[in-house]
Image (spheres, rainbow, N blue to C red):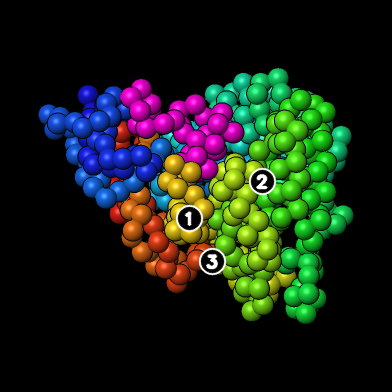
Amino acid sequence: MSALLITGADLAGSGRQDLLIEDGVITEVGALRSVSGADVLDADGLVALPGLVDLHTHLREPGREDAETIGSGSAAAAVGGFTAVLAMANTNPVTDTAEAAERVLDLGRTAGLVDVQPVGAVSKALAGEELAELGLMARSRARVRVFSDDGRCVSDSRLMRRALEYVRAFGGVVSQHAQDPHLAGPAACCHEGELSGRLGLPGWPGIAEETIVARDVMLARHTGSRVHIAHVSTAGSVEVIRWAKQQGIAVTAEVTPHHLVLTTDLVAGYDPTFKVNPPLRPREDAEALRAALADGTIDAVATDHAPHARHDKEHAFVDAAFGMLGLETALPVVSDAMVSAGLLDWSGVARVMSENPARIAGLSHHGQPLAAGSPGNVTLVDPSADVTIDRDSSLSLSRNNPWHGLTLRGAVHATVLRGRITALKGGLA
Ligand SMILES: [Zn+2]
């Protein structure tokens, strides 16, 4: 039998307790005496959260193992406090069959640092024309429940309707990258506004997101199915989602750490590190996103971790690849921007970074309260540690880190997956 005793942790802000994990399951919580044979992890001064769950990770394997592998991405995730990540389908080949999904699952198990749960493509080869093998992926060993063409929008209304109808049968959800391609085409690379005009960059207007969000909540209502809005970036999208939730429509939404904090003025220097899709928005949008995360309109923080090799990112702004790293910095950013700012307490962080994402993804072994009987998945956070982000210390294979050089309050101290310490003090355990 394996046993881990975590002593003196503040359980999501509800007071100091000891936590005993035996054979991967939490068996006791309270003031515990030393347990013979148990490894001890001293958590004095630390906050314990249920293991973090990322709804939106790009691991690049298969196809672009120069940018990330399932192994390197799993390592970055563990160090970032995650015990489960959803691996997006836009790999090469695309995760659009049961076999492809099972392969991602198995590579994740081999790496063994986090549970890697494959996301299935909505359409074959992400082409937006024919539905992928949704049912076969759902019935496979990988039990796929989240489907997304992320990187691309399911812009065809009829295809989106059919996908929603299909996934309803097995409690699945369609995660939408909301971008009307007629309003924001592939060249659109910067928030459309005064700045994009001055810089001469093709603009990506907020309305291109909002029209798809509005359409999709209506399709969710019509089909009685679940839609999830990936990386919400505008105040207008927040308004639509708030309205839809008031109507009882089954919509959930995520926001990235970068859209919570970083703003469009950062692209003024044409640094492709700040090129991301959807683009960084004005300050008013970021403020609305933080408020929506605090009041529950937005359910989850998701990283949209998007590693890119140097030769894809280091180009003129218009030609560079979209995306930023996020797994290792998500918790410090949320801690700094939401907890230190008084917008969320630690139980709120547990909700938006573990409980809600696990529920949305249908991962019953994650996001459970830290109580007897729950899986032994725990993230220990030092809420008073100041961390200076250094892109060169990353376990990701890529370096496109927009937080480099910033000092943030709050750090992941340790990550525990089913009673096994996977990461400790910024490195693998
Ligand atoms: Zn996306």
**CA neighbours of label 1 inside 10 A, class few (<14), some (14 to 19), many (20+):** few
Which region shows up in magenta? 350-376
Q: To which residue does mark 1 refer?
A: 342
Could you tell me which residue is drawn at 28 percent across and 29 percent down?
29
Query: Does the residue at mark 3 contact the one at mark 1 (Cβ under 8 Å)?
Result: no
Q: To which residue does mark 2 refer?
A: 230
The disc label shown at residue 424, or none = none
Q: In the rendered view, tell whether residue 404 sits above or below residue 382.
A: below
The amino acid sitting under disc 2 is Ala
The label nearer to you, 1 versus 2, is 1
Q: To which residue does mark 3 refer?
A: 402
Q: Is residue 268 magenta?
A: no
Q: Quadrant for the N terminus, please.
A: top left
Could you tell me which residue is drawn at 45 percent across and 28 percent down?
365
Which image quadrant is residue 332 in? bottom left
Which image quadrant is residue 373 in? top left
The amino acid sitting under disc 3 is Pro
Position of residue 209 in the picture relative to residue 230 (left or right): right
**CA neighbours of label 2 inside 10 A, class few (<14), some (14 to 19), many (20+):** many
Q: How many marks?
A: 3
Q: Is mark 2 within 8 Å of ligand 1?
A: yes
Q: Looking at the image, can residue 17 be seen?
A: yes
